[in-house]
Amino acid sequence: MVLSHKSIKFDLDRSDEQTHIAVCIPVSDRKDTLPVTLKSIANDTYDKSRVVVIFYDGSTDSSDLILQYFIKEHGPRYLKVIHRRETTPSRGNIAKARNGCFSLARDTEAQYLVSLDSDVEIPKGTLKDLVDFIKKDPQIGMASIPYVYIQDDNEHPRTFEVDVTLGCTILSRELLDRVDWKIDERFAKADDLWLGAKAERLGFKIACYRQKRAIHLKPLVYKDHLRKRLLEVPRYHYLLLKEGLLTRRLRRTYAYYGAYLLLPALYLVNPLLLMLLAPLFALGVLHYRSLRRFLMTLPVGIAMMLGLVVSLLRDMVLQQ
């Protein structure tokens, strides 16, 4: 389904007009969070006549009806709204659903593509902030507004911040052209990981606009997050390693958390070497600029390091 607001030839050099962008949202059974996401899009202050909204919809719940209502109520305000029902189920493969969005955005006039998840609420002004931010440096290929998980299942709510993802991110057309508008679908649940690594390998900068925070509408279950970092994410990191795409950032991360695994061995050599724990802790607190955030992240990083070791050992066994 396509709704056209109007047919106009745009002069992209006109200073009084905002940049033409596409907002791409893959949707899969998000009836609980989708209304809030769509409301935040509708409330954004960006000139809607310069925006194409693309829904790539593989839902089996009532998400489709929610999208239809949004199109009816808000569609005429946008340059175009594209709603494509997924014919081949992605079966949880986020990369495949994202590729469906990208293929539809490729034929638009958009200079930039904003990738947004259907369970993320964006603050007002997000689209303009992202466009202004990425336009300041032509070397930036991806720029994200961090989103925050809200832990609301206890008396003292905690937050957990995620910075560079495809949950609330602007992408340059140049970067998308260089990757042929496709994410490697082997990275089914780590599409942002592959695209970020590929962008860095191609010489693009990956940036984070920290003046605002988006909100992830599904509360973080810390145990599940820890389990994924132990059992799922390291497999994708190992695949990056085999493909020669492991970024310097990830190499530094593994080196840092790997040091914690070496400490018991160092202690056996010389107990005084355990004093190295103090500067390691201090470095982590300085990096996260918060003792609480560091203590939340430390078990996650160690679990991820253990998962990578298991992935390496598994591959060595399979090759014998």
Image (cartoon, rainbow, N blue to C red):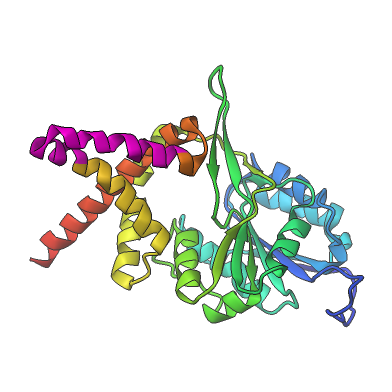
Q: In which quarter of the image is the N terminus?
A: bottom right
Answer yes or no: is residue 230 visible. Answer: no
Q: Does the magenta stretch include residue 265?
A: yes
All told, the count of numbered labels is: 0
In the image, 252: left or right of 7?
left
Q: Which residue is drawn at 16% across and 56% down?
A: 313
Depth check, front residue: 140 or 224: 140
Q: Give the range drawn in magenta.
A: 263-285
Residue 143 appears in which quarter of the rendering? Answer: bottom right
Residue 247 appears in which quarter of the rendering? Answer: bottom left
Q: Where 171 falls versus 216 (above or below)? A: below
Q: Main structural element of the magenta stretch: helix, strand or loop?
A: helix
Q: In which quarter of the image is the C terminus?
A: bottom left
Q: Position of residue 170 (x, y in %)?
A: 65, 63
Q: Which residue is drawn at 58% across and 60% down?
A: 207
Q: Where is residue 161 in the image (x, y as percent from the top left)?
A: 55, 41
Q: Which residue is drawn at 58% across and 80% down?
A: 177
Q: Position of residue 41 (x, y in %)?
A: 76, 51
In the image, 100: left or right of 271?
right
Depth check, front residue: 18 or 70: 18
Residue placed furthest toward the top: 155
Answer yes or no: is residue 61 visible. Answer: yes
Q: Does the magenta stretch include residue 180?
A: no
In the image, 277: left or right of 216?
left
Q: Position of residue 107 (x, y in %)?
A: 69, 79
